[in-house]
Image: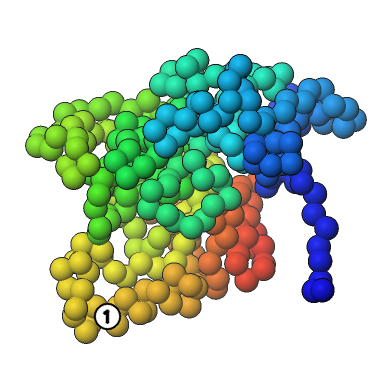
Amino acid sequence: MGEQTLQSPWPVHGSVLVRDGAVFCAAGRIRFLDGGVRFLKLDAQTGELLSKTVLDRTEWGSTMHDMVDYLDMPPAMPDIPSSRGKHVFMRTQPFDLEGNPLSPDTFIGKEEFNHLFTPTGFLDDSWFHRSYWVYGTDYESGWNRWYNAGRRSPAGRIMVHSDEDVFGYGRRQRDFRWARPLDYHLFRTKKTPKKVKREGGTGGYRNPPAKKLVYDWSRELPFMVKAMALAGDELFVAGPPRIVDEKKAWENVYSEDYKKKFRRQQRMLNGSEGSKLWAVSASDGDKLASHQLKALPVFDGMAVAYDGLYIALDDGRVVCLKN
């Protein structure tokens, strides 16, 4: 027999949330295995168990299978918890501050439950085209629904937010559809953004949405953003250089020059030329400063604390930059 590893059936997923002297965490792998997922609330000082909610096959007097809507149902897998207002969230699932889950008909589409989430979990760095981060309440799956959340709510590959605004990097809103080449941008918009009518387009899966979100500012970058952090009036973004314009590449896919570009771009995405770090103005998106990093940032691996910018790199180092 080969080497075997003993693992807990209830690992704590990713990290924990500390709020008002309490620690919230989700322990387990999925609702349907090993007795489900335990959503716990602990005293941060003593570790005393304050509440425990078991998330398994049954919920709200029914089974999870009975709650399937097309290709969607309440979250079955844990994630790093987050908090806003009077609620704690695990993916799209809200809990009250005692750890009790709320049923979907009480929160979907209601502004007070808007929060930052991603349907595949905050630790997913796969860049899958049907998955992205959303500031909203819900997400729809499937070939003809996956883009709906991105049409009605602020959405991107990676995002941060302040009290009033959302900052993100991702495809432009017109590309939330069946589109092969994508056009990426860095943007700022309100948590509840204004929407204006778009000329043309039916909102069908091959057409742009009938309405578009209004951005406070939007700009293109010469690199792909894999890490982002907000500190007051400055937004920090980092990632590998981007040399291929996807729309132009689609028109020149058989060009030998573009084939060379494709190969170099692939090497860049794997870290061959390190990554760029920019500080931009949160108010207008203007570039304030730049720095060259020797390696790629770990996805969402950047934080600001104690007047320093901390970045986890995929070569195993953590660097701290200060003014």
Depth order, front residue of 247/193: 247
Residue at 21% across, 62% down: 247
Q: With 172 as the anchor, is 291 left or right in this view? A: right
Q: For the C terminus, give its image quadrant.
A: bottom right
Res 242 seen here = yes
Q: Position of residue 78 (x, y in %)?
A: 63, 39
Q: Position of residue 287 (x, y in %)?
A: 38, 54
Res 22 seen here = no
Residue at 53% across, 67% down: 296
- At label 1, counting other C-alpha atoms closer than 10 Å, the crowd grade (few under 14, some 14-19, many 20 or more) is some
Q: Quadrant of residue 88?
A: top right
Q: Which residue is mark 1?
A: 259
Residue at 87% across, 32% down: 47
Report the coloring of the rendering. rainbow
Q: Position of residue 292 (x, y in %)?
A: 49, 69
Query: In this figure, what is the number of numbered marks?
Result: 1
Secondary structure beneath label 1: helix
Q: For the N terminus, give its image quadrant.
A: bottom right
In this rendering, is residue 297 above or below 207?
below
Q: With 16 as the anchor, is 71 left or right in this view? A: left
The amino acid sitting under disc 1 is Lys
Residue at 13% across, 38% down: 201
In this rendering, is residue 24 above or below 229?
above
Q: Position of residue 64 (x, y in %)?
A: 56, 29
Depth order, front residue of 214/98: 98
In this rendering, is residue 34 above or below 102?
below
Q: Quadrant of residue 69?
A: top left
Q: With 296 as the anchor, is 155 left or right in this view? A: left
